[in-house]
Structures are given as C-alpha cells and as structure tokens.
Amino acid sequence: MARIDEKLEPILETVKQRNAGEPEFHQAVIEVMESLGRVVAKHPQFLDEGLIERICEPERQIIFRVPWVDDQNRVRINRGFRVQFNSALGPYKGGIRFHPSVNVGIIKFLGFEQTFKNALTTMPIGGGKGGSDFDPKGRSDGEVMRFCQSFMTELYRHIGEYTDVPAGDIGVGGREIGYMFGQYKRLTNRYEAGVLTGKGLSYGGSRARPEATGYGTVFFVRSMLDACGEGFEGKTAVVSGSGNVATFAIQKLQHYGAKVVACSDSGGYVVDENGLDLDLVREIKENRRGRISEYHRIKGTGTYFIEAGKGSIWDVPCEIALPCATQNELNGKQAATLIRNGVRVVAEGANMPCTPEAIAAFQRADVLYAPGKAANAGGVATSALEMQQNASRDSWTFEQTVDRLDDIMTNIHDVCARTAEEYGAPGDYVLGANIAGFVRVAEAMRALGVI
Ligand code: NDP
C-alpha cells in the first residue's frame, strides 16, 4: 500500500476524529489521500488553499425518520439518509441504497467516491448518495411502495433537477424509482422528469440505463486488455453478485466471447462449468426475486452451489474477476488465491469491493486492476445522458446511447492511464483515477471561492 504524504497526515487525522466510527468512509478517504502526495508536490496550492480538507467534508448531510405500515398493520420505523457531498461540478448526483447495513458512514463513503467518479465522466454532475436501512427482501410490492412513498415524503424537499438527482443502487431498481418518482410528482405537482434517473422508459427513462454500469465495466476491461494487445475470447470470468451490475456485466462478457462460470448473492455462489445460463439467473433473481442457490437445483449436472461462509466465489479459477456485489467483498487472502489461480484482470463493478490489502496484492502481482470510481462510472454517466434527454424532451435509440457510453468509458480509461503516466506511475489506474478526478473537482472548487 502506498504511504500517505506527511503533509496530508494531519488532514487525515482530522477526518478520522470528526467522523469517528465510520471505517468505510475512512477507507475511501485514505485510498484517495494515498494518491494525492504526488499532486501536492506538483501543485502545492491545493494544500495551501484548504481544498483537500474541504473536499473531505460533505456540503450537507440529511438524516430522517421513515415511518411506514407493514402488511400486518404494524408501524415500522427506518432511517433515511442523503449526503450531498460536493456540487462544484453540477447538481449532486448518486444513487439510493436500501439495505439493512446502511448507515451514515457507508453513505458518506459512497458519496465521497461518487464525487470523483462523476468528475471522471466529465459530465456536469456533483457527488451525493442516499439510502435507508430498510430491507426490501421478503417485502410485498405494497410494503415497498408504502416505504418508498414515505421516504420521498421527506426527501422531496432536498432534491430537484437543479439541486440533487438521485438514482438506484443496491435494493433500488426500476420498481422503487417508479414509486419514488410517483410520490415526488404528487407532492410537488410537477412532472420534473430530470429529478431522478433510472426511470422506466414509459415515464422519461433512458434506453441502456439498466445495462450501463455492467456494460461500462466490461468496456473498461476491454480497454485495459486492448492496451496489452489481448482480448476476451476464450478467457474465463467470475462475476460476484447477481443484481443489476452483475447481470449486465455477465451479458457483455458473454457477448465478447468470455466464459462466465460463477456468480453469487448474499446466500452463496453458484458455479456452472459450461458457462452460466444468464436467462436462468435473471428468471430466479428478477422475476421470482429468489435465491441464486435455486440455479443449481434447477440445472443440476455440471453445476454446484456453495453456501456463504463455507467458501468464497474468489476460489473459482478465472482470468477476469469482476466484483459486482458490495463493499469489502474481496480481501487480501482471496486476492492471493485469485493471483495463484492466474487472474489477469480485476475490475470493480461494485463500489470499493476490494479491501486495501487486496488492491495492494493485485498491484504487486502486476494484475490489471481498475478501481470502481473509474470502472463502474458508466452507470452515472448514462444517468447524466438520461438528464440530457429529459432536459431536451428527447429520447435516444439504444444504439446511440450505448455508443455514447462506450466513448465515455474509453475516455475514462485513457484519462486514467495518461494521468498515471504523467505522475510517474504507468499502469496504476488507482492513482490515475484518483488524481484525474480530484484535480477536476478541486479546480472547480477553487474557481467558486471559499463556499
Ligand atoms: P442490486 O441490488 O441489483 O444487486 C446487488 C447484488 O449484490 C445482489 O446479488 C445481492 O445479493 C448482492 N449483495 C448485496 N449485498 C451483499 C452482501 N453484503 N454480501 C453479499 N452479497 C451482497 O445492486 P446493484 O447491482 O445496483 O449494485 C451492486 C454494486 O454496484 C454496489 O456496490 C453499488 O454501489 C455498485 N454500483 C451500482 C450502480 C448502478 O447503476 N446500479 C452504479 C455504480 C456502482 P442478494 O440478492 O442476496 O441481496
């Protein structure tokens, strides 16, 4: 792991003290700080003007009560969050996560990452993130709708097309965005399509938004392989998760000729030695809202399922590994196993899925490693394209939208690679992404004065 420059240490100490008990947020800040030593050596004004302290402090944090009534007529109380991290480049932009593990530290780490990710897209969007500790698993449609309506009954006063534009994340897909948009429309009496992204096509959504994060991650991998004169054909891949990001990443990998042999959910992972049947994964996870273990029960021969806790999906040998489930799902030991088994490329479809020890191991072993803030930026970039279509009351074709996404991801790859080289660390996509993202945000902040 890189060391933190001594000039930055006091800033990091303050961040830790001021945000005690938020380990994921500390982890995200440390990862960026490790890259910034080289920036302040070249541009000391970023330090002198307090820009690094300011960039680590969210502009606004909102925490609220979300009361709702379940199907048994019992009153339930959850907690809602929206962290509006940085609006130097545009309205706050970032998803909403519904998962029992959500707390303010997790939302802050996600909002911090989002700020640099959004800058890398070069689109006019600031960084934010939100969510709730609500667990949608096992809840009826009616319960999910009532929860979303209650969540929006507070959130609506903090968001808007020019203020803050949420989208989906873990546990928030098309269904939840629809319920939240409906409630926003009702409360404000405005058809303000640009207030949320990830909408359905029938009410202002963009084609290719559901596909964008997974496809974008694979486009990024394609660029990394291209740079080494390699392709996907004949390579074996493992993708963790089986939600939005994972399923579209699998689809694109298969399209390019890779064989995807494993995916997972929070209950465990399934292996299909003949290559995963994506239609079946979707049928189980999307239509039945079931468990991935059902895959093995249905398919039988050539497949097996390992329960969570009894093994790790990263034990499965592969050349391409895409962690697409959640934060810190791939640790140093698992990275060592992947390396031993010949992994060539690791790209983060999820946000911060690799622990610092795992990242260090990949980099030491010269594995091509792409951090989430670069590799999974295709989702938010396409959300920005959705905002463009809403603003111009236009609707683009699928091909047009995917072509734009492809260009954006290629550009992010090239900017990260170029920046890494410029700062003396060729091939270090972490450094390239952190520096390119930081410089863009910091320059805009400086131009706007001390606000
Ligand atoms: P989904 O809710 O669609 O899918 C999440 C998947 O990850 C599910 O298979 C889920 O399993 C699994 N998972 C969630 N939490 C855990 C856990 N604690 N342990 C093991 N497995 C878990 O979410 P997305 O696909 O949208 O998001 C996945 C990741 O990608 C997140 O890190 C998100 O922040 C990131 N991301 C998403 C973007 C988007 O556009 N959606 C954009 C950029 C990043 P189960 O079904 O059992 O819950």
Image: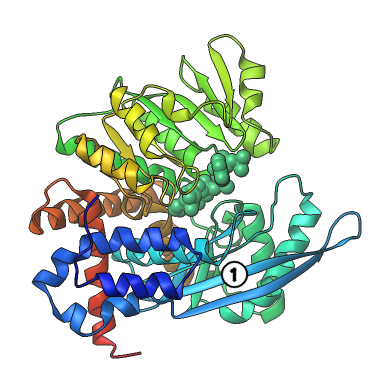
The amino acid at mark 1 is Phe
Q: Is residue 294 visible?
A: yes
Q: Residue at x 23, y 62 (%)?
A: 4
Compared across the picture, whether 266 is left or right of 438 comes to right
The one nearer the camera, 10 or 144, is: 10
Direction bottom: furthest residue: 450
**What residue is disc 1 on?**
81
Q: Residue at x 61, y 15 (%)?
A: 299
Q: Position of residue 428 (x, y in %)?
A: 19, 48
Compared across the picture, whether 228 is left or right of 135 comes to left
Q: Quadrant of the C terminus?
A: bottom left
Q: Is residue 392 visible?
A: no
- In the rendered image, which quarter is residue 78 located in? bottom right
Compared across the picture, whether 420 is left or right of 367 comes to left
Q: Residue at x 43, y 49 (%)?
A: 212
The one nearer the camera, 120 or 97, is: 97
In the rendered view, would you say 103 is above or below 15?
A: above
- In the rendered image, which quarter is residue 6 located in? bottom left
Q: Position of residue 327 (x, y in %)?
A: 47, 49
